Amino acid sequence: MDTTHDIAQTILAGFDKHYRLFREISAGARDIFERADWAAGHAAQKSRIQMYDQRVSEGVTAVLTRFPEAEHDDTLWPRIKLAYIGLLYNHLQPELAETFYNSVACQVLHRKYYHNDYIFWRPAASTEFLEGDEPIYRCYYPSARGLRRALLEMIADFGLKNRFEHLRRDVLRLARALRAHFPDTWQPTASFQVQALGSLCYRNKAAYIVGRVIDGGREYPFVAPILQNSRGELYIDTLLLSPEHIAILFSFTRAYFMVNMEVPSAYVTFLRSLMPNKPKWEIYTLLGLQKQGKTMFYRDLFHHLQHSSDKFVVAPGVKGLVMLVFTLPSFPYVFKVIRDFFPPPKDVSRETVKEKYLLVKYHDRVGRMADTLEYSYVALPLDRFSPELLEELKIHAASGIEFEDGRLVIKHMYIERRMTPLNIYLDKADEARKRHAVREYGEAIRDLAGANIFPGDMLLKNFGVTRHGRVVFYDYDEIGYLTEYHFRRIPQARTLDDEMASEPWYAVGPKDVFPEELPTFLFSNRSTRELFLRYHGDLARAEFWIEKQRQIRAGIQQDVFPYPESLRFCKQAPHADERRQTRLSLAKAG
């Protein structure tokens, strides 16, 4: 074997080790769920995120230690790439292995070699019809044995060791919800079947059955969350059938799912059939393969640049003191660059900002914090930047940019989904949408508090409204753990002079928060402030925050449902057949 083949094998061995460990952690989510060890779940999630960079570092060290010529002889790399392509024949994760190769090569090569001769700028291996030893999904045929029996078999095949609280009741609820989704005149065809992914999708305190119903030429996606009661017994909480509810569950505002996947591309293909409007890169990311998601997003960005002509411009809205934010109007994302200096009252450093964004990456985002894609040394066409934006970058972020061969190289930036800033949304909203947004804003703060997150800067401009009408936090430079703050009531003034003084008459520490000041500080508009107090008046009392801290320190993890409470089976009136089944169960028990 020649050197190039040996280097290719070394890199692939590093990837295979990475994916083996990634899959072990993902498969371990089942045991964590069955034991209801939510703290272990968060630790596993963090470990899985961190491991990619660790394996890449190991791969770079292995290549440079065994083959020091790889760092200086750039003519080797086109041949290394060809040898690597040959090794991917019959590989079950070829697209991930290509991305891993890129990560190693880019730490060895100079940036001028970042093109398709040296790295996988374009994918070389096809993932179409890629199958492993394990089936991607299982099929059940209600026409043969009845819908309830098919659903019962589907649930049993997951082999969860915990007993169900009342499995027959849950199957009745599932069957009834499924039938109600079809038209009254519906008659199933001979091809009627239920398909469910072979692995449950675990996140937070739930395990999700994800599948689709096939009836002739029609497909109906569904998701069924499995939860636990206080005794460790399982129950199915609801059946999500609306594409909108499923899209919100699998959104960019939630932590990555744990899924035991032998062939990731096949899982992505299945999930994309349920959510055809969601790009592939986002599905890879929600499955915990965030590096692959970044690679595919980068390709999407440059494909879009090739087929568009509008220019990057300063993002609309109030300018931030920490981030310079710009956007491409035809592309639904914003690009954030850390400013060179932060004017008062901001008192943070560049490294602190990076640490805050990393905190969010590792934390459960509970559907209320936007995920960010972090990139280094991104070269964008210089002629696609508006003069105003270029001037802003030169003045406020000069240390973070370079000019090279007609391109603007941004040394470090974050990319997020573009949303409408909440302050702008409220200014333009009618009364009904304003009420909904204010209610959502308070719910976002509650959900974050329950996840041990305090936004720090709670101004409306730091929250955005998604296309589904959800309010999401996206400005992280002052974010912190809720338990690190001191929530206080404003002491009573001792004298009239105290009340009239421009400065507080009491000592204020750097982590002190006075919730009763929030409504006035956050809402200059009186009617909006009154709405907030009507829906969320308890957020303006220190007692709310102190109680949240007590619960977190006691290890109590708040339930956050990624779907409306009204959809939960327990919130719906029991059906006649469900009441009959309950009576039969009680009679047997008696």
Image (cartoon, rainbow, N blue to C red):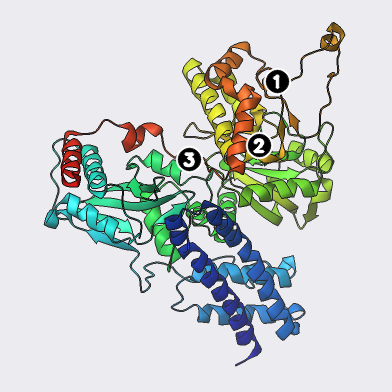
At numbered mark 2, what does the secondary structure look like: helix, strand or loop?
A: strand
Answer above or below: position of 448 versus 61: above
Q: x, y percentage for residue 463?
A: 61, 32
| Residue 559 circle label | 3
- The three-letter code of the residue at mark 1 reads Glu
Element type where label 3 sits in the image: loop
Locate residue 319: give its quadrant. Answer: top right
* Residues tagged 2 and 1 counted as in contact (Cβ below 8 A): no
Q: Residues within 10 Å of mark 3 (few under 14, many from 20)?
A: few
Find residue 179 and report its image quarter: top left
What residue is drawn where x is 40% and y is 39%?
244
Determine crowd level at label 1: few under 14, some 14-19, many 20+ residues with C-alpha closer than 10 A.
Answer: few
Q: Which residue bears the numbered disc 2?
A: 454
Q: Is residue 70 left or right of residue 92?
A: right
Q: Are marks 2 and 3 in contact (CB under 8 Å)?
A: no
Circle nearer the viewer, 2 or 3: 3
Q: Residue at point 75% right, 36% down? A: 388
Q: Nearer the viewer, residue 104 or 449?
A: 449
User: Of marks 2 and 1, which one's residue comes earlier in the chain?
Assistant: 2
Three-letter residue code for mark 3: Asp
Q: Which mark is residue 517?
A: 1
